[in-house]
Image (spheres, coloured by chain):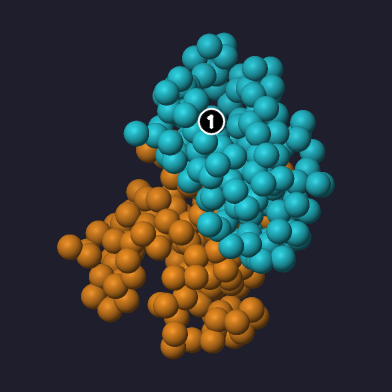
Amino acid sequence: MVEWTEQERSIITGIFANLSYEEIGPKALVRCLIVYPWTQRYFSSFGNLYNAEAIRGNPNVAAHGIKVLHGLDRAVKNMDNIKATYAELSVLHSEKLHVDPDNFRLLADCLTIEIAAKLGTAFTADTQAAFQKFLAVVVSALGRQYH
Amino acid sequence: MLSKKEKALIAEIWESLSPVAEDIGSDALLRMFASFPGTKTYFSHLDISPNSSHLRTHGKKIVLAIADGAKDISQLTVSLAPLQTLHAYQLRIDPTNFKLFSQCMLVTLACHLGEDFTPIAHAAMDKYLSAFAAVLAEKYR
């Protein structure tokens, strides 16, 4: 089981309480598709991903980014049992979507960068550490049911 | 592979950050120590508490080396030769840590540059830091 300090819990819930999902969700996914272009392989049905401008303007990408970001809400509400919380989603990503679990880490890194860009110096080293720990647990849970 | 445009962008960014090398470098190091405590093991001989002079001096050294390499990326193997030897034979830092430091440097850049740290800049920078780390580890074995 993952141990969370009171400080870590409050950092995580604080970040999500003040998060603009409509803004950050799309940005994080857009960033991932641009910085790690091989991740585009999972989105061939999304239409035009030909260049950065196209990706940025693609409504399917934006909608999906918001969906994925809201997907983290469950982990925030169940921090003491993230592994079980995501068991079903893990199976989905493995058996239906066939996503290489390494990609979860890439998207998590892009989300971190977007939050850092938004919060600036308020995204302190300790805030980053707590947030990254949280995302690492989520990433691990999402990869857990792969076999 | 870095395009001409990316190389120019990278050189421009590091040029603009060189005056605040101490701030950037110490920030990235602090972030790395907080998120990846194992990295602290390489610094038992220094005082790496926030704002310590050791931390700022060391951070500055690293950033200036990165900025220097950015001036002519095609010559990285030449310009980094002395640092390659240092890391291979003396420091012997496990190269996995270069990735951790690079990630924290990207976060520092995001905090510092905000909206200006566009996905394009991010991609270019990520590629550059990966190349830098790879060259640094070349003499290890």
Query: What residue would you read off at disc 1?
Result: A88
Residue A10: name its quadrant: bottom right
Pick whichever, A50 or A31, lies toward us. Answer: A31
Q: Amino acid at mark 1?
A: Glu
The reply, left or right, for residue B97 in relation to residue B110 is left
Res. B60 visible in picture: yes
The image shows residue B80, relative to residue A41, as above or below, that is below
Pick whichever, B26 or B30, lies toward us. Answer: B30
Pick whichever, A81 or A38, lies toward us. Answer: A81
Q: Chain of mark 1?
A: A
Please report the residue visible at 57 percent of the width from the left and 14 percent of the height from the top.
Answer: A46
Work out which quarter of the rendered image holds the C terminus of chain A and state it: top left
Q: Position of residue B137 (x, y in %)?
A: 29, 61
Pick whichever, A89 or A13, lies toward us. Answer: A89
Q: Position of residue A67 (x, y in %)?
A: 67, 27
Q: Position of residue A75 (x, y in %)?
A: 65, 44
Please report the residue visible at 54 percent of the width from the left and 50 percent of the height from the top.
Answer: A137
Looking at the image, the residue that sits furthest to the left is: B141
- Chain B as rendered: colour: orange
Q: Position of residue A113 (x, y in %)?
A: 62, 47
Please report the residue visible at 34 percent of the width from the left and 70 percent of the height from the top.
Answer: B93
- Chain A as rendered: colour: cyan
Residue A29: name its quadrant: top right
Res. B69 visible in picture: no
Q: Secondary structure at mark 1?
A: helix
Q: Residues within 10 Å of mark 1 (few under 14, many from 20)?
A: few
The reply, left or right, for residue A82 in relation to residue A103 is right
The image shows residue B119, relative to residue B105, as above or below, that is above
Looking at the image, the residue that sits furthest to the right is: A18
Count of picture labels? 1
